[in-house]
Amino acid sequence: MKALDYARAHGDRFLSELNEFLSIPSISTHERHRPAVLEAAEWLRDRLLAAGFPRAEVMPTPGHPIVYAEWLPAGPVSPTVLVYGHYDVQPPDPLDLWRTPPFEPTRVGDDLFCRGASDDKGQLYVHLKAVEAFRETAGAPPVNVKCIFEGEEESGSPNLDPFIQQHRELLAADVGLISDTDILDRDTPAIVYGLRGIAYLEVEVTGPAGDLHSGSYGGAVHNPINALCAMIASLQDADGRITIPGFYDSVRQLEDEERAELAKVPFDRQDWLQEAGVKTDWGEPEYTITERTTARPTLDVNGIWGGYMEPGTKTVLPSNAYAKISTRLVPDQDPAEISRLIQRHMKAIAPPTVSVEVRELHLGDGAIVRRDSPAMQAACRAYAAGFGAEPVFKRTGGSIPVVATLQKELGIEAILMGFGLPDDNLHAPNEKLHLPNFHRGIETAIHFFQFLAG
């Protein structure tokens, strides 16, 4: 295929361009980096135009802008692919743990170290270069391509859903394409087809009007920390099953066929225990570790505090106690409904000696996509052609909320075609991108567009 030959011949230039992109410190969470975020958006727009997109623009939001591009050469009868990615990056802290400067792309062997290399600049740039290869060899890509690249993913995407809701017609497509995940190893591609959602809350338990002396009041006034700990302890049984009434009502059960598919994902229990730094696993015994961490809902206390926490002693009976609680949710569980169930349950189980307030901090939908759709079949063929191996289907325990948004707002499913590796150090010092995957990713994207066109 001529597009593949072009991509291979221009790989060094593609990498040089990526280095320019990575050098821009587009940290969305820091206000002082707002000019750099805009610079990255404008750089990306210019590269989209250079790749052949006749329309590419930086579109404002109440926060950081969204870069939109489209090339619709194939007409209304051909598939339209909506490529999503994000050009913002995590802060590089702690700086002293980086072996190379975080915004100076540094090649070490086959790896490129820089913040954003894998998450997500390097992965999204794959698709620009695939489109460019078609332009230079065939005049245009074989399918219609739209792109939406946001600058706030690392700060919660507060303006993405409203933007999509306001631009449904502009963003109309047949399938979404997202490269923001990893594969199993350098030679074993994987497609994520299931993502968990989240409901994140903060609980405040209040007892006496003010802090009291524990020697004078202990034993007669209920300590809010003690009460909160007892309440939290009652939320799960000894095997990790969540005891909140109604919590499992909408949980989609794992069918035998899907469990067999998940069992194909390579897993070594001893390696996992060592990686986690624990003596043994814990949780619902009727499910495997892979199933528990990707396809079952969870409840975890992420923080708990109250009373005196400084060095030394202070025999205080505190007025307040606090906890942050998150639940990871599987498809069909509504985060808003789960939040309501938790709030109602925490107030119901609170002893009459304290009062309880529950604040909702963050909600996100889970998603699951079909493994037998034409687009998924095209993705499997593309991976096989680009990597020389059939992809493994897997779920992930984390969340990519835009997948559910595309389903709800645009009525399309997304193909999660990732090219990162599990050891790419996302959100950590020494983030990297395995360069052979960058180049094979471009070839895989070329194959995907071609196979999708039929």
Image: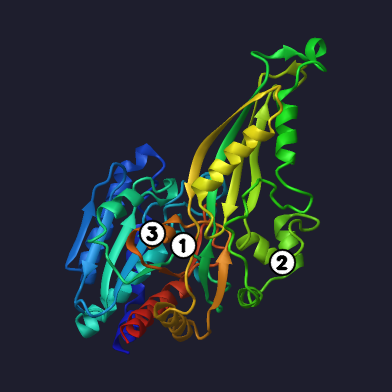
Q: Amino acid at mark 3?
A: Lys
Q: Amino acid at mark 1?
A: Ser
Residue farthest along the left direction in this orientation: 54
114, 360: nearer the viewer: 360
Q: Position of residue 153 (x, y in %)?
A: 41, 51
Q: What residue sits right under mark 1 in the picture?
A: 118
The tag on residue 303 is none
Q: Please tell me whether mark 1 sits on a helix, a strand or a loop.
A: loop
Q: What residue sits right under mark 2 in the picture?
A: 288
Left or right of 104: which side holds 241? right
Q: Amino acid at mark 2?
A: Thr
Residue farthest along the top direction in this orientation: 216
Q: Which quadrant does the N terminus fall into?
A: bottom left
* Residue 15 in sight: no
Left or right of 291: which side holds 195? left
Left or right of 203: which side holds 74? left
Left or right of 187: which side holds 346? right
Q: Position of residue 401 (x, y in %)?
A: 45, 55
Q: Going 75% across and 67% down the picture, which residue do you hit?
A: 269
The image quarter containing residue 317 is top right
Q: Position of residue 302 (x, y in %)?
A: 63, 42
The tag on residue 408 is 3
Task: Choose mark 2 or mark 1, whichever is in front.
Answer: 2
Q: CA distance from mark 3 to mark 2?
A: 31 Å
266, 353: nearer the viewer: 353
Q: Which quadrant does the C terminus fall into?
A: bottom left
